[in-house]
Amino acid sequence: MTDITAASRILADAFTNHTLIDPLPEDIAPKTFEEAYAVQDATLAQVGIAQAGWKLAVATRAAQEKIGADGPLVGPLLDGRILGDGATLTTKDIHFPNIEAEIAVVMDSTPAPDATSSDILDHIKSMHLAIEIADRRYHEKQSPVQTLADLNSTSHFILGQEIEGWRDLGFIGGKVTTKSNGEILASNDDPDAWPEIFGGLEYLVGFLAKRGQSLKAGDVITTGACALPTITPFGKIEAIFEGLGTVSADIKQV
């Protein structure tokens, strides 16, 4: 039987102390996505860091079907960990920097609980190029359920330049490349492999409504990887969105 208190205590301690752990013991680990969300909520409460937004993972239908999910997997973005373009982190901040080129949204107001993707457009303040630097607290990569419990692998987030005229741009599906120290990590020019950005936002609004929550002005939402997430040890990281711009950060080895 899942022990939410015990499981969340282990994960919160690992997050707070920047340590790595083994998989959650079978007798206390979540077995379903809903149990994992309960552990995630309890972990976030124990960590004691304010939430500044949301992250969507497993953001394509093909990926969701593969793991038996009905939509993207949801996690928090944390206050103080949303950084600007060109920010510097160190290996003391992060264990396994998983680099993801993403499109981020900053909210201007709160959509209705039953808002459709087209309704949500009127509640968006801006859209941005971004890099999510995901991380885990486990020694080894875990199942989607254990990963979801671990704050959905949240760590740091680089909020890059605003996409000017985003309502009128056909920017979704352009070539995206991630690099580390000039070497290509991943590249994608297949529009079908991009996350369903506005569909993901619609899912998130409904997901939160079921839990008595909602998006609010100032929330940052990152909508899923536009190229294959790839772990890099350290160095200058870049997400290059062809025709739109580049986002970068440095992860220094200490």
Image (cartoon, rainbow, N blue to C red):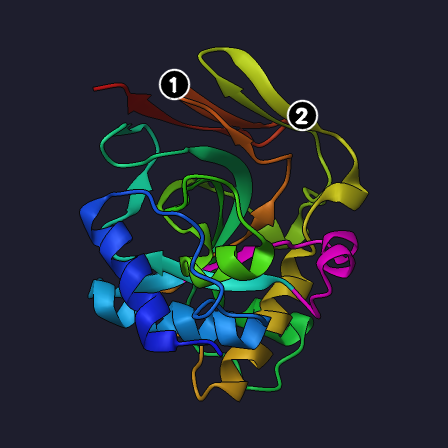
* SS label for mark 2: strand
Q: Amino acid at mark 1?
A: Lys
Q: Is residue 183 visible?
A: yes
Q: Is residue 174 left or right of residue 108?
A: right
Q: Position of residue 69 (x, y in %)?
A: 69, 66
Q: Position of residue 106 (x, y in %)?
A: 43, 59
- Magenta-tinted stretch: 54-71
Q: Nearer the viewer, residue 106 or 54?
A: 54
For the point 75% across and 42% down, which residue is it? 193
- Residue matched to label 2: 187
Q: Is residue 113 above or below residue 74?
A: below
Q: Is residue 69 part of the magenta span, yes or no? A: yes
Residue 236: numbered disc: 1
Q: Is residue 242 part of the magenta span, yes or no? A: no
Disc on the earlier residue, 2 or 1? 2
Residue 127: numbered disc: none
For the point 67% across and 67% down, which residue is it? 71
Q: Nearer the viewer, residue 97 or 67?
A: 67
Q: Amino acid at mark 2?
A: Ser
